Image (spheres, rainbow, N blue to C red):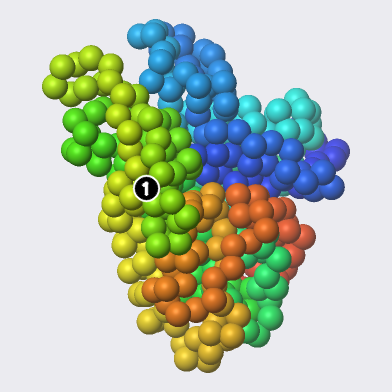
């Protein structure tokens, strides 16, 4: 028998490959944690979730495994994702046995119906009374303060950990879009490959991320000191011993060239498929950037050079999708009429 619902909160969840953000109506963003969970292999017991689990990546003994259950923007391990999401929801609103919330979860714009059902069901199993899904670029636009309901075109590019979502929006819906399974994680992987090839040095994901954040650039011409260097420690592939090398900003830029070119090609493709009237709107308004990936130095300058359009980074790009999921719950009628939100209830 289903428990009676006396009261519930509206919750928006940015279920990202790299991080999970939770928005609670009336409180704002109440949780920001890495999408990592550490589990004991034999018993399945949860050892740590979020930041504590992230610190364990690559450092766990054989009896414990640290997992990132989302890959390329979608659920790779359903059971682990459901447990992680339940933990984050309980941490955000408390363990209310009969306070089942309405939950809005964002998904990449190019997901399959199977991936969509998995996200819906994970939210329901984690304790939602109703689970709504919204596509990431639409949520990002709402969070960035764009009025998506107006009869005018807007262009948003959301660069997350696992995906890059590019969309043209108008009248509360997505007119044309492309979802690319290239994001911040692919930047890190490209840096790891480059360092291994050029320096015969094996480094981990966290070291690659530090390189990207500290000295990485998408546009070396716009950097004050393109030869800025950073000491990088790893394992020498020839001797097998620990080793330190100096990696420069120019080297990191070369490493990032391939994923960045894939992104630029996808942006061009979306612009080519945009109806002429909306193209005129975008020429006037420019492109809005959201997501943690756009904080890579020079990303906006590179995009501006390639498109000849004005490019604006949102005020708080990392929070835009989470803020947008919260706003979407307040305008369900408009979004559902535009078929921009899907819904599933508990049975």
> Does residue 110 appear left or right of residue 48 in this picture?
left
> Does residue 84 lie above or below 291 as drawn?
above
Q: Quadrant of the N terminus?
A: top right
Q: What secondary structure is found at the residue carrying circle 1?
A: loop
Report x, y in % for residue 88: 64, 31
For image coordinates 26% across by 27% down, the residue present is 202
Count up the numbered dots.
1
Residue behind mark 1 = 227
Image quadrant of residue 50?
Answer: top right
Please state, as top left, top right, bottom left or bottom right, where the C terminus lies in the image: top right
Q: Judge whether residue 316 can be spotted in this image.
A: yes
Q: Nearer the viewer, residue 335 or 163?
A: 163
Q: Residue at x 50, y 21 (%)?
A: 55
Please identify the residue farthest to the left as the structure is shown. Answer: 238
Q: Residue at x 74, y 38 (%)?
A: 30
Query: Closer to the camera, 164 or 174?
Result: 164
Residue 116 point in image, percent of width and height: 48, 51
Residue pictured at 48% horizontal, 42% vertical: 213
x and y percentages locating residue 8 in the rendered image: 80, 41
| 84 relative to 272 in the view: left or right | right
Vertical side of 288 occupied by 184: above or below? above
- Residue 294 at x, y percent in the picture: 51, 56
């Amino acid at each position: 028998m289903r428990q009676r619902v006396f009261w519930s909160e509206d919750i928006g969840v940015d279920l990202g490959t790299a991080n999970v953000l939770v928005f609670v109506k009336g409180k704002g963003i109440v949780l920001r944690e890495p999408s990592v969970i550490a589990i004991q292999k034999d018993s399945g017991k949860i050892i740590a979730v979020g930041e504590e689990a992230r610190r364990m990546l690559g450092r766990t003994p054989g009896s414990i495994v640290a997992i990132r259950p989302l890959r390329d923007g979608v659920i790779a391990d359903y059971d682990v994702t459901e447990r992680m999401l339940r933990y984050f929801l309980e941490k955000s609103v408390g363990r209310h046995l009969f306070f089942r919330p309405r939950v809005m979860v964002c998904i990449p714009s190019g997901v399959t119906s199977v991936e969509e059902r998995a996200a819906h069901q994970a939210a329901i199993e984690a304790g939602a009374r109703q689970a709504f899904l919204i596509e990431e670029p639409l949520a990002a636009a709402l969070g960035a303060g764009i009025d998506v309901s107006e009869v005018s075109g807007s262009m948003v590019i959301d660069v997350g950990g696992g995906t890059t979502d590019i969309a043209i929006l108008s009248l509360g819906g997505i007119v044309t879009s492309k979802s690319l399974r290239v994001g911040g994680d692919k930047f890190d992987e490209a840096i790891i490959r480059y360092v291994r090839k050029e320096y015969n040095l094996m480094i981990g994901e966290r070291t690659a991320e530090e390189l990207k954040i500290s000295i990485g650039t998408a546009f070396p011409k716009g950097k004050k000191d393109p030869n800025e260097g950073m000491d990088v420690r790893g394992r020498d592939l020839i001797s097998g011993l620990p080793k330190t090398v100096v990696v420069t900003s120019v080297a990191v830029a070369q490493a990032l060239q391939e994923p960045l070119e894939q992104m630029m090609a996808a942006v061009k493709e979306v612009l080519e498929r945009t109806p002429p009237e909306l193209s005129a709107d975008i020429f006037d308004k420019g492109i809005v950037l959201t997501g943690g990936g756009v904080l890579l130095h020079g990303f906006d300058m590179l995009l501006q050079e390639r498109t000849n359009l004005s490019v604006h980074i949102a005020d708080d790009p990392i929070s835009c999708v989470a803020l947008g999921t919260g706003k979407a719950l307040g305008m369900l009628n408009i979004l559902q009429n535009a078929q921009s939100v899907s819904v599933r209830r508990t049975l």
